[in-house]
Amino acid sequence: MAAKRGVACGVLSWLAASGSCPFAIAQPLSQQDVPAPVEPSAPSFPPGWLEWSGPPECPGPEHVEARIVEWLGAPPASAAGLKAKSTVTWTGAGWQVEVVVTWSDRVGERRVRLESCRDAADLVALAVALAVNPDLDAGSAGVPTWTDETSTSPNAAGPPPDPAPPDTAPERDAASEQSSRESAAGPAALAPAPAGQWAFLLGAAAELSMGALPRVHGGVSAELGIAARRIGLWVGGRFLPPTNEVFEEAATPIRFALIAARLGADYDLFAGALRLGPRTAFELGVVEAGQAAGALAPLEDSAVWAALGLGIHAGLAAWRWLEPVGSWELTVPLTQPRFVLDDGTLVHQSTVGFRLDLGVRILL
């Protein structure tokens, strides 16, 4: 019996080695043969979800995605059709950011003017985070500080599952701004403005003035300069065309005109949709007077004109690159040109006056 059992075991061993024995003894699997468990892939942002347009000095899509993950804990699910389009531009009075967010069947649009382009990128991230999670506690999440929201127009592309979030988003954003202002030491504090935060400006205006010439005169002015954050520096000129003035002491009308170069600066105390602040200017030029025939001594005369202007300026940011502007100045003469007749009669001497101008400014 032992011999038969030994033969059987030998046959089984041979069949097991050849792989043809259905009763072959199973060999234990090694650790390398055990398949590793398949882990679910981490959520990520869908390709091409953000259409970003902004200058190179501003944080880009990577910063936006990092901030979204910071507030939500992970990228939102791609199945809901997340799409966002943002445009960041410098307007001379601040960074203008326009963002449109599409999430599920809802669409939200926002346009805001900010003080730094880092805040512009943060706004895009927060708009997405609030669209995905309307119940996000923005105050505790450390949202950025921004000001001067110019428009908010959320609208639904279809019936949303809960209409409350689009309606309450502006109120939630306002609460977020207040909370972040109250904790300036946290991550909500305004970041320093990056380099390159400036724009060229070109302006033209019609003006009314009195003081340099007799009575009220109309004229034109122009300026060219740069705007950096809230400050504008410019050079320009003004021209009051020749106008005939009648004096009882003179036999014929006397023609007066003024041409002057100007150097000035503006500061925006308010830098939202309405810009408003002080303005100062220095001007240097010539006042001319002439008479075709008569008693002016001499018939053609001119005098140096220098003055200091102090006043206020205002601008309405109605368009991205064009804004109506106006200013009012008190004109204090630093020289006092005198024009007298040949008999010594004084017909005009420049005095303290004013300038009022209305025009447009182009931001390049």
Image (spheres, rainbow, N blue to C red):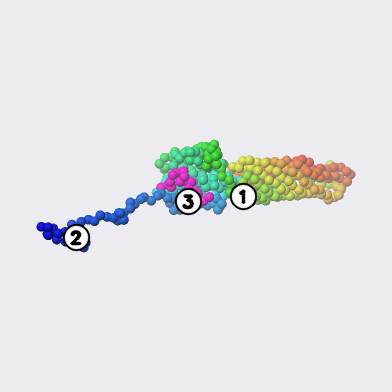
Disc 2 marks a residue whose amino acid type is Ser
Does residue 339 appear anywhere in the picture?
yes
Query: Residue 119 shows which numbered tag?
Result: none
Q: CA distance from mark 3 to mark 2?
A: 65 Å
Position of 354 with respect to 163 (left or right) is right
Q: Position of residue 190 (x, y in %)?
A: 56, 43
Up the image or down, 6 lies above or below 287; here it is below
Does residue 240 appear anywhere in the picture?
no
- Mark 3 crowdedness (10 Å alpha carbons): few <14, some 14-19, many ≥20: some
Query: Residue 198 shows which numbered tag?
Result: 1
Q: Is residue 243 magenta?
A: no
Q: Quadrant of the N terminus?
A: bottom left
- Mark 2 crowdedness (10 Å alpha carbons): few <14, some 14-19, many ≥20: some
Badge 3 element: strand
For disc 2, the marked residue is 13
Q: Residue at x 65, y 43 (%)?
A: 267
Label whose residue precedes the other's in the sequence (3 or 2)? 2
Q: CA distance from mark 2 to mark 1?
A: 87 Å
Please give the range of residues in magenta: 59-77
Which marked residue is nearer to the observer: mark 2 or mark 1? 2
Disc 1 marks a residue whose amino acid type is Trp
Return the residue found at the far left. 1
Q: Are marks 3 and 2 in contact (CB under 8 Å)?
A: no
Badge 2 element: helix
Q: Position of residue 231 (x, y in %)?
A: 64, 45
Label whose residue precedes the other's in the sequence (3 or 1)? 3
For disc 3, the marked residue is 50
Position of 104 with respect to 262 (left or right) is left
